[in-house]
Amino acid sequence: MSSDSSVDPFAPSPKASKRRREDTPAKASKRPDQRDQKPKFPTASFEEVQLPPISSDYPMAADEWVYFDVGPAPNAIRRQLHKEAVCIHCKTFRNAFESDMVEGQTKVYALPETNMRTFMLFQQWVYSQTFNLSQLAAGYEPDNMTDAEREAEDHTLAELWVFGDAYLIPILQNAAMASMIDLSWSYHKIPSMDLMNYIYDHTMEGSALRTHVVQLYVLHGGTEVFDDCKDYQPAMLADLCRKSAALLKVNFYPRGFEDADVEGCYVDE
């Protein structure tokens, strides 16, 4: 491989923009591509959804409900979901609702650190195992959303990953990650600094979510990612340096997100 100094080793690959939308890292890793599934909920990601009937495949009574108080008290918003739909996916909630603790007696679980946008995506996933994301919807055009709306959707996916981490729902984390990877692949964008700060404030060293965003910065951001390094959290800067050094050590010159270690962005289920 040539080491021509005039070539930016971190420049995005010209072929990346020519890739078909369907050739996403999520597909390459056999993870579900949200664009291939018709959303059960036809409106925007964070709007109210109608709860579908529960299948007889669930082992518990189909008419049994549990409740989540979303947000900090005393202004928490109470949401109700079918118990079996929640418990079949999350052992943490199942253990709580079937215990002698207050959650088992009242069937109410408090989520003081969760916002409604994140909970609505969780609710969609509980019933359909997919997300209705505007940026991945068929016929989506960038003009359909403002920058703030796109940022909110990106941020909520990261919050959902953190939610899954907090309540031990790895399958939810991986579903959120598949969507984040598809968004990154489709639009070749890197997270905002606000989103990076949120991720580093709410994850541990070596987390799969950190792995994902660091790869985005190194593979898509080019050498410019170090221009504002004085504003980076120390842990983030250390991760960026380690990733860049590791690639250069093996004489590997990344050209785009197709070179990312996609499987390293998922957690064990």
Image (tube, rainbow, N blue to C red):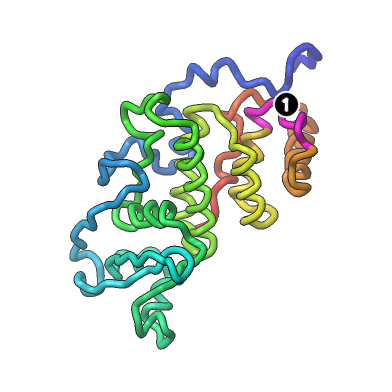
Residue 84 position by quadrant: bottom left
Between 41 and 185, the one nearer to me in the picture = 41
Q: Amino acid at mark 1?
A: Glu
Magenta stretch contains residue 255: no
Between 165 and 224, the one nearer to me in the picture = 224
Please state if 216 lies on the left or on the right of 136 as rendered. right
Residue 251 location, x and y as percent?
A: 77, 27
Q: Who's the residue at 42% across and 84% down the image?
A: 102
Between 195 and 99, the one nearer to me in the picture = 195
Q: Who's the residue at 73% across and 21% down the image?
A: 9
Magenta stretch contains residue 227: yes
Residue 222 location, x and y as percent?
A: 69, 25
Magenta stretch, residue numbers: 218-229
Q: Who's the residue at 65% across and 47% down the image?
A: 197
Above or below for 37 versus 66: above
Q: Mark 1 highlights which residue?
A: 224
Please state if 59 lies on the left or on the right of 108 as rendered. left
Please state if 5 lies on the left or on the right of 115 as rendered. right
Residue 217 location, x and y as percent?
A: 66, 34
Above or below for 170 versus 112: above
Dominant secondary-structure state across the stretch colored magenta: helix
Q: Who's the residue at 63% across and 47% down the image?
A: 210
Between 190 and 22, the one nearer to me in the picture = 190
- Look at the numbered disc 1 and give the secondary structure of its residue: helix
